[in-house]
Image: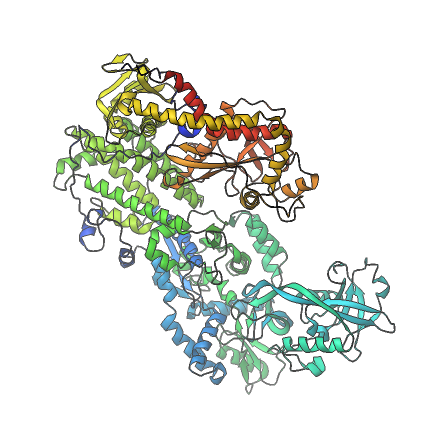
Amino acid sequence: MILQMTLSSPFLLSSCSSAHRLNPLLFSKRRHCPIKFSHFPFHLLTKPRLLTVASAATENGVFTSPENAKSFDFSSEERIYNWWESQGFFKPTFDRGSDPFVVSMPPPNVTGSLHMGHAMFVTLEDIMVRYNRMKGRPTLWLPGTDHAGIATQLVVEKMLASEGIKRTDLSRDEFTKRVWEWKEKYGGTITNQIKRLGASCDWTRERFTLDEQLSQSVVEAFIKLHEKGLIYQGSYLVNWSPNLQTAVSDLEVEYSEEPGTLYHIKYRVAGQSDFLTVATTRPETLFGDVAIAVNPKDDRYSKFIGKMAIVPMTYGRHVPIIADKHVDKDFGTGVLKISPGHDHNDYYLARKLGLPILNVMNKDGTLNEVAGLYSGLDRFEARKKLWSELEETGLAIKKEPHTLRVPRSQRGGEIIEPLVSKQWFVTMEPLAEKALRAVEKGELTIIPERFEKIYNHWLSNIKDWCISRQLWWGHRIPVWYIVGKNCEEDYIVARNADEALEKAREKYGKNVEIYQDPDVLDTWFSSALWPFSTLGWPDVSSEDFKNFYPTTMLETGHDILFFWVARMVMMGIEFTGTVPFSYVYLHGLIRDSQGRKMSKTLGNVIDPLDTIKEFGTDALRFTISLGTAGQDLNLSTERLTANKAFTNKLWNAGKFVLQNMPSQTDVSAWEAIRNCKFDKEESVLRLPLPECWVVSELHVLIDMVTASYDKFFFGDVGREIYDFFWSDFADWYIEASKARLYQSGADSACSEAQAVLLYVFKNVLKLLHPFMPFVTEELWQALPDPKEALIVSPWPQTSLPRFPNSIKKFENFQALTRAIRNARAEYSVEPAKRISASIVASEEVIQYISNEKEVLALLSRLDLQNIHFTDSPPGIYKSWDANQSVHLVASEGLEAYLPLADMVDISAEVERLSKRLSKMQVEYDGLAARLSSQKLLTCGLLQYAYNLHHSPVCRESSRGCCPWGSRKGSRSRGEDKTHQEPVSFPKILYSGVTIDFTIYVDVSAILPRHDQRASCRDWGTTPGWKCMELVRTGMGQVLTEREQWRLDLGFINGVMALYEIEFSRPFVVSILSERRVHAPRGLKRGKDGARGANHLTTKDKRRVYLGGKKTVEVQAGEILPILTPRDEYMLLLKLALFAVSADAALLAVLKPRLPQVV
């Protein structure tokens, strides 16, 4: 039997462009290899040196070495945290003399329990604090809790109710005493839970908003504002909670859309038989009507302007009919009743026009004497009774369903009533002007920048702030009234009762009697003073105020930008003369995996404490820190599981490093390791290629990560570290280092590898510590001779030497290794089997590749004795030659030849390929026949386009991927017909991974114009988009996101290279996944910090592929050229044909060259 094989053509099994012409899915470059060869015997390797390295910290019982534990034990996190706190690491120190970094923790409610919102702000603030502490800055993270007036009073009232006691059964002092007892017993719950997240706060400075010193600050602030005339008392419309019997802030009112009713009522015109029909959602407030308003441009009602209308059920009370341009002609009947005592818009309109204000509601939600016979009825009961009587009198026209935006109390849940009430207010306009200038002058930076517009808009349209609350728990308003005098005119503002009495006696005589205002201040009033009251203000001579004010950073959720952040800015400038912080960092909300807001109703709430028990604190912190400032984050168990695996990977890497260090008694070995320095160019340059590469990459990483930390790009920091550690250090260098560590002899190479392993791993722990403090500290303490705790260790030095040339050389080395690995996988070579190889390259490349011959053999599973290097295609080496080899092109100027006899059974391979060819030939012939069918082109086009446009798959894609799919409101023809699935296309095999793909084609060229508008209006795109969706099966286990991205691009480029299609007009193909057409987050930045060339964006432009590697940037809304219907369908079929034709084309080349059996 004679075998004849001629597979030397570079077109075959090449990893460069020619291979992509066959099937880019088979030959796309990959970063991670699905096959690991790190645990198989290597004939030059000896057993690893499993020598234990202990540390003092490990021996003291606080820490556990990876050598003694299979994985990181989450239960040790509390032990580590207590050790940090006991050592005083959380306190600021001025040893290095740098500017302090100060963060005031947003005080959680004392009644609260930990939720994911707390986990978000604790994680982000702790990252900032730990980073700056390691940078040597005196770092203070000042914690505290808020007394939460309404929430706390409700909790205690419920507790008393369970004992059969009402709040009113107790005196004010007795009640507040019970609240303080509750606070002492339960108030520390949220604090302990925050500690569980790893918050490195200075707990010795913990504050509570009702502490004596903070209470003095509140009183001082009230007095100063009052002295300036910025605090006043008056009766104005406020948000009133009937159940809580108090005014509530805007933040404590939540609006929900609920089903309601729109009532149509007749208002007779006085002196005429005509009537106006008013549509209202709250008929019970008609007793407070003071006018009827219409739009002056509404011809239906212009004749009634200036006349009087009779309010129903009020025994003939007349109100004027007025004109106002703000009346919506299209809402209801276009006639608006003005009830300024119970509607915010009506209130401001009445004040503008000088109309009277009638209040028809008591503070408990019942109607008062103004309502006449309805007095004493509950507002909702009165509504039903009033409508019934309106129907009886013929004044009711109709009622119809209407969706209402209902204001509800955040605490009690009852419907909030707009009510005129006597309250204390702060004049905000002069304070807001200073806060606006702070941002304009750059004294305050808001991150992300887009929230500056929201900040400016709110301050530019600010209203006076109602600061009084009708509660017993909180800061009592420092105002005393004179018995027998008018409360609005005769009152005393003082710091305490003694001072108030002294002032009253000076003004009204010695026999005067005084009593304090029963109301308390809004909780947000004390919170607005938080950045400086916690540091000792009004005592500006206190050490903390002098050292740490103004603070550096305020981190919080974007939803309280106006309610808290803006007020702190205003108060800080007013009382201290400076902005209270330099930066405001706003985070988004944490949502579930489907992007929904977490709620008990949906059952999608994720408990942080349960998450910590299952995945660990570090995994949780790392997961929620990878978001973008101001953007909501979708949290899923899949992400948590992946980052738990990252924790384990880190642990196992630490175990490998420790197990391959010399024994502590080996003084000479340790001396050799310590003599290896990496801060000088010459010391790095003389390292072997893998060591020089990984150290250079580390130094690049340190600079990039440090810059991102300084810019608060925490998501980029986490992704960069993750990518380097997993892809570069763990997957490549650790594997490469085994060639040095496990071989006999060459102690200098072994020492260099040990030194590099230790150096890189230590720096990775430092870079990662702010994100994952517990596992990194545990590993740090297990390393030999830790001089200090990782939490206070110095940050890695920047601008260290790096060598781009060495990085490029090792990337060529990696490309060669990947090519060989992929070839082994393609031919199903047994992992333990070693094969021969001939490496063809220039003399320069051969030199650095051959120097790492052992590493190449280890990583690629080559026979070390049969690796040959040459500068030209090889001749005959023993039993094999180049014509019977698999030819690989790793990169430009670097190729490899692998003998086919070493990898496959030729006879079995021939049989397999023949069967595959027969099966694909049938599919190929079928598609080719369809393509050539004129009947299919003329008749099948419209039918297929119809099926595609109306299929369930397309409808689903319209919500997530396909930009032209049918949307709500589309008037497409045949909407009621049976939906049909789009054509199913064959599966493609990519290195053992199955990929299903569906082709979507734009049907705008054949649909009516109204369908075109319906399909494009919601997406902001134009007809002409061609959408291809790759649905991957099982890829998450094999490919990284970056590799999937490269695979997608390779597919497009492969299509264009294989089919040199010339259409009458250009066409556009775009990869779409989850509404994204941009490179994945993990795509590594270039050395200049810019994104790679494959970056697509939808922000302002779209960069789309026009075939091959050509791209064009298309402005949003720009009209793109579209295909003719024939070209459209031709493209569809050709893309489908590609699924089988790529392999068929490969077999067509192979078939005449298959070994002939004689």
Classify 550 as above or below 482.
Answer: above
On the rendered structure, is 1105 left or right of 159?
right
Q: Nearer the viewer, residue 1057 or 383?
A: 1057
Q: Nearer the viewer, residue 1024 or 199?
A: 1024
In percent of width and height, residue 653 lies at: 26, 42
On the rendered structure, is 617 left or right of 858?
right
Classify 479 as above or below 647.
Answer: below
Q: Quadrant for the C terminus, please.
A: top left
Classify 1044 as above or below 549.
Answer: above
In percent of width and height, residue 72 lies at: 27, 50
- Residue furthest front as drawn: 1158
Q: Nearer the viewer, residue 606 or 1084?
A: 606
Q: Quadrant for the N terminus, please.
A: top left
Total numbered labels placed on residues in the image: 0
In percent of width and height, residue 474 lies at: 48, 72
Residue in view at x 80 percent, y 70 percent? 320
Q: Look at the image and name its color scheme.
A: rainbow
State whether residue 594 appears in this view: yes
Q: Quadrant of residue 1107?
A: top right
Q: Quadrant of residue 203?
A: bottom left
Q: Quadrant of residue 664?
A: top left
Q: Nearer the viewer, residue 708 or 1129?
A: 1129
State whether residue 17 appears in this view: no
Residue in view at x 58 percent, y 38 percent? 1100
In percent of width and height, residue 112 lies at: 43, 66
- Residue furthest left as drawn: 665
Classify 554 as above or below 495.
Answer: above
